[in-house]
Amino acid sequence: MLTFGSIMKQNADKYSDKPAVIFKDKQWTYGELNKRANQIASAFLSLGYKKGDKVSVMMKNHSAYVEIILGLSKIGVIIVPINFRLVDSEIEYIVLNSESRGFITTAEYAGEIEKLLPNFPQLDTVVVVDGAASASLIEYESFVARGSADEPEIQVDETDTLYLGYTSGTTGKPKGVVISHRSRMLTGMTAAYEYKIDESDVHIVAGPIYHAAPWIFLMMQLIVGGTLVIEESFSPEQFLADVEKYKVTNTFMAPTMINFLVNLNNETKSKYDASSMRVLISAGSPLPTQTKLDVLEFFQDVDLHEFYGSTESAITLNIKPKDIRRKDRCVGQTFPLVECLILDENKKPVVNGGVGELYLKAPYLLDEYYNIPEANEASFWNGYFTVGDMALRDEEGYYYIVDRKKDMLISGGVNIYPREIEEVLYSHPSILDVAVIGVPDPVWGESVKAIVVPREGVVLNELDVIDFCDGRLASYKKPKSVDFMNELPRNPSGKILKVELRSKFWAQQQIKI
């Protein structure tokens, strides 16, 4: 049975005394992890929870997060992970939209949630990890102690929903993405095959578990019987210290995290032995070419993979180490069991080398968007699905994500893809971060603007940036103007909030191209 609970029960038998989870120097074996998951499942059952009920979870990375995922999955209760950085109105939207019946958080956020309780008439259970009980809050360890360590007698099928993950909401309200056990189990199993991960491996969870990608790789490592090292939050130096201490062999990191890591000073990087690391996987946004070269120089023996995917589709495309240098700005070939199409506006296939919208079919896909029929209608076509990304395929069958459809700008009737320009600017030795957007132009409709974050201690001016593009970009693609910022706005997934960057330029325009 392709359910998370069934594989963990099996692993508890096979690897009973083997470390499954390490968090803040404390470890739990597979046997201990499974028993605590059973207790959580039993405790919720004792309160009348049934398959299909939902429990929101909002916390930083914690060993309890793994127990909760596993415990709820054993009884078919749907997990709703919430980003702990959200403000009250955003939390309220997700809890109400998901129709969550329960809520689990940590002491850090308990006061905030307790204030919101009058707005959540459907919530009947709020559990707090590492916190004290009150009239409306249940202390986590006492809650776990209520439950039996025996396996729950609930039939969970692979087609049942495992979790309801909310998209980052770069435009409009976040959408609930309905993900089945089968989807994520197959993703984890296939990822282990693709990245050559087995029970001997140690995976460090550096990114936030509420996000789809760290969740996938967490499941991948537990499915094969390996060990997880969980970091509460990402710190580049602490990451290196943990790699050395626990002999970490693989990890997933978003490009912004990798950028922070490679930009540590050489003295700090040289303090730690990271030679155990053999597989590094990146996704979330394209890995800038210069950052890619820097990380390959630092982790000299690592197999670097970069994949393209989404909450809705899991992993769609993957570029392997053998191609990572040869194929610049490429996201590789289709992940196992994935079929891709590149279609024009009339849903006709685009020839190799042409740009079109990427559609895919795979067993990892979402079931649907939760209670948003218009989004389902817009995203699904003949069994294929799209998130609206523009791509091209070369003659060798390798794919390139050119840009988000909504990020494409049109200047003088010509399509311009900001990602191409950003890649050139990322190679400038004095630029740390960059975003390219279209701004209103009375003649051309839109013109290219670069928004640049210089490296610390560097002075850059507009002409420096524009002149750097000479010979590297066609003249019509070169930025016509440059703004400078100390930091670019990003969502929790690390994606630049271009809507926010554009807003001040388009606010007075009746037509927003």
Image: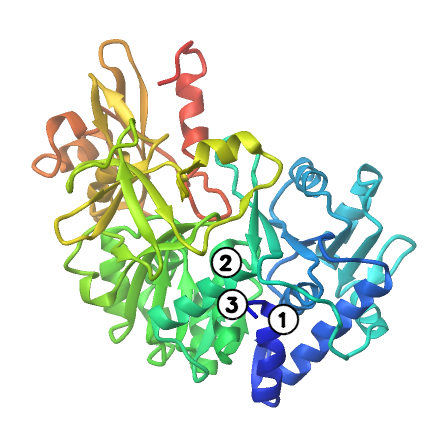
* Residue pointed to by mark 1: 5
User: Which numbered disc flags the more N-terminal residue, 2 or 1?
Assistant: 1
Q: From the viewer's side, name the closer residue of 448 and 251.
A: 251
* Location of residue 158 in the rendering, given as x and y in whole percent from the top left corner: 58, 62
Q: Label 2: few (<14), some or many (≥20) within 10 Å?
A: many
Q: Residue at x 80, y 54 (%)?
A: 126
Nearest the viewer among 488 and 195 is 195
Is residue 247 depicted above or below 297 in this figure? below
Tell me the residue at 63%/49% (across/down).
Answer: 82
Q: Residues within 10 Å of mark 1 (few under 14, many from 20)?
A: many
| Foreground label between 3 and 2 | 2
484 or 176, nearer to the observer: 176
How many angstroms separate mark 3 from mark 2 (CA)? 15 Å
Task: Give residue 399's position: percent from left, percent from top.
Answer: 23, 49
Distance, label 3 to label 1, CA atoms, is: 14 Å
Q: Is residue 396 above or below residue 188?
A: above
Q: Secondary structure at mark 2?
A: helix
Mark 2 to mark 1 CA distance (whole Å)? 14 Å
- From the viewer's perspective, is 199 left or right of 176? left
Q: Residue furthest right?
A: 135
Q: Earlier in the sequence, mark 3 or mark 2?
A: 2
The residue singled out by tag 3 in the image is 218
Q: Amino acid at mark 2?
A: Ser
Question: Which of the two labelled residues, at mark 3 and mark 1, occupies the earlier sequence position?
Answer: 1
**Image: 466 above or below 215:** above
Give the tally of numbered discs.
3
| Disc number placed over residue 183 in the picture, else none | 2
> Toward which corner of the image does residue 244 lie, by quadrant?
bottom left
Residue in the picture at 57% in, 70% down: 1
Query: What residue is shown at x 77% (from left), y 60% (from top)?
Result: 128
Horizontal side of residue 187 vs 440, given as left or right:
right
